[in-house]
Every structure is written in C-alpha cells, then in structure tokens.
Amino acid sequence: MIMNMPPQILISREGSSMSSSWTEHLCISRIGNKWTLGEYGYNWAASIDEIPEEERYNEEGDINVPDEWNGHKVLGIADGEYIETDELVGNGNEIDFESSEIKDAIAFAIEFNWDMHPQFDEAMKKLQIIVDGDVLHE
C-alpha cells in the first residue's frame, strides 16, 4: 500500500532580499506513487493587523503572539509583521519524481544551490534512505 507523506525537512538555509529575510527548507513529500522534492517555508498566514487591535499588544507594547492561527501552531512573528505558523508551504520550486529517478531530484537540489550547504551530503543520504525505505515497503 502506498502511503502519502507530508513535507519533511531535509535541510534549511537563510534567504534574504534587500527588504526581507526568511528561512527556506528543502523538503521531501509524497502523494501516491510520486515523490516531490521542493523548497518550502513556514506559512506567513496573516499580518499582525489581523489581530484585533485591543488584543494586539500587551502592557509593555510588545505584540501578543497568538498560540494558534487558523488551526496551526504559531511559531512567532516573521519579518516584524507576519504571523508565522507551522504549516509548510511550497514556493513553486519543485520536482516530481519516481523512486527510480532520484538522480533527477538531486540534480534539482544542485540547480538551486543546495549543494553549497555544509550538510548537503547528509541531506541527500537522508533523501535516499526515505525513498529507498519506502520502495522496500511497497
């Protein structure tokens, strides 16, 4: 029986632009008999402006970070104004592959410079173990 698997983080790195910074994750997931390797981030679910004004700040003037937002655990405030939840969302950079095509997935990771990360080899070994281990259970 083929089991679906939600995104699992293999490796993480910091990303930035002139006005923002974030953490991006290389994740593996599975739906049916297709694997997906892609870049994900934790969901910036809402602006702090969506917290009712009377509940937004505590007595010291700090933001009251909710414990939960739309059914997801809140990790904190990202980029100074966004409610960041534990929901992993893809950024559109991804490759679908079958177990026999794992080399294509590794090439994808290299194309997006994940091989520059000091833990890249370890992450690719983990990818191989996940894909191979699942093949053994089919």
Image (spheres, rainbow, N blue to C red):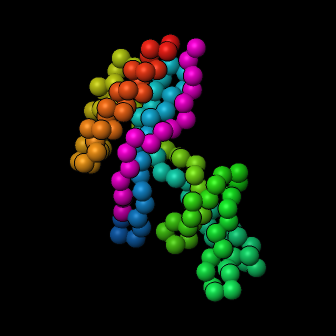
Residue at the image position 37 percent from the left and 45 percent from the top? 11
99 vs 32, left or right, is: left
Horizontal side of 115 relative to 137 (left or right) equals left
Q: Is residue 99 above or below residue 23?
A: above
Q: Say if 110 sits above or below 83 in the image.
A: above
Rendering coords of residue 107 (x, y %): 27, 33
Q: Residue at x 49, y 44 (%)?
A: 90
Viewer-side residue, 58 vs 101: 58
Residue range corresponding to the magenta coloring: 1-16
Principal secondary structure, stretch drawn in magenta: strand
Q: Nearer the viewer, residue 93 or 74?
A: 74
Residue 67, picture quadrant: bottom right
- Asked where in the image residue 55 lies, by quadrant, the reply is bottom right
Q: Residue at x 63, y 85 (%)?
A: 61
**Residue at left offset 55%, top offset 35%:** 6
Give coordinates of residue 23: x percent, y percent: 42, 56
